[in-house]
Image: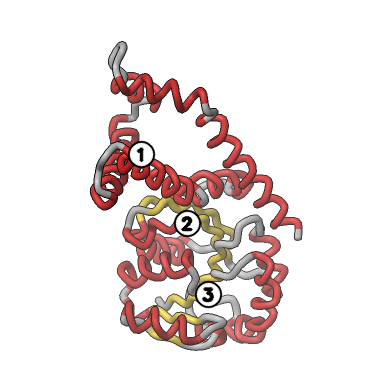
Amino acid sequence: MTYGFIGCGNMGGAVARAVCRGAGAQNVWLANRTFSKAEALAAELGCHAGTNEEAAGCDFVFLCVKPHLMAGMLAGIRPVLAAHGGKFVLVSMAAGLSMARIRQMAGGDWPVIRMMPNTPAAVGAGMVQYCTAGVCDEALGAWLAAMAPAGRLDAIEETLIDAPSCVSGCGPAWAYQFIEALADGGVAAGLPRAKAQEYAAQMLLGSAQMVLQSGAHPGALKDAVCSPGGSTIQGVRTLEEHGFRGAVTDAVLAAFAKTLEMGKS
């Protein structure tokens, strides 16, 4: 199987890294509007750099462009897809664009996988939701094997896929903000910047593992850290006073509203 990527931005590049590990770099082709970007990433990963048309000739065609650029890009590769006769799978990661829209833009009732990855896929710690239309079991199995190094993969109904994209897809940016803020606090308390950042990042990693491995409710895990009259509960109280919980929820809902808006354009 061969895997073509049209678009080598942050998200496309992260997924390409995972697929190079899962399917072999020799089976991966990268294309980008700025060819030098695809060329540089291909040299780093040991895969191929080429044109959109070359990437579109692969068995799996990853569509890694922004939603507002999707129609124009797909119009350009329609002849290649038509000549391929449906013996391929389109893989879209465009927020807000349904599989029906992708098929319409691509000019055919082609097999489609819609995925919502996140950038930690680049280091094998991603969260990827996906749904399919017209994809046979053999092709899906090959895609899942190629994507396995990205991290966790979860099949989900398309009607739900916009919501997790605003939790795990957008969430890394907010996690980085939290790490940065924790590090700032550590520096203010006297820690060197490098150590404060390391401690904050490892704390977040370990806390996430506790949630995933224990199955306990985050609130229960939080309570287990808070000793009566201790320093941690004072920090929790301060975060609540400043609307921490509501601000995070509002961030998810703001991202969700924007995702729905992009799907209508």
Going by the numbered disc 3, the residue's amino acid type is Gly
Disc 2 target residue: 117
Instruction: Estimate how packed mark 1 is, as few (under 14), some (14 to 19) or many (20 or more) residues with alpha carbons within 10 Å.
Output: some
Going by the numbered disc 1, the residue's amino acid type is Gly
Place of residue 146 in the rendered image (x, y in percent of width and height, measured from the top left): 37, 66
Q: How many marks?
A: 3
How far apart in space, not on screen, are marks 2 and 3 (Cα)? 14 Å
Instruction: Estimate how packed mark 2 is, as few (under 14), some (14 to 19) or many (20 or more) residues with alpha carbons within 10 Å.
Output: many
Nearest the camera: 44 or 199?
Answer: 199
Q: Quadrant of residue 200?
A: top left
Identify whether 94 is placed above or below 182.
Answer: below
Secondary structure category for the residue under label 1: helix
Place of residue 88 in the rendered image (x, y in percent of width and height, measured from the top left): 53, 75
Disc 1 target residue: 185
Is the residue under label 3 in contact with that under label 1 (CB below 8 Å)?
A: no
Going by the numbered disc 2, the residue's amino acid type is Pro
The circle on residue 41 is none
Secondary structure category for the residue under label 3: loop
Q: Is residue 52 left or right of residue 172?
A: right
- The N terminus - image quarter: bottom left
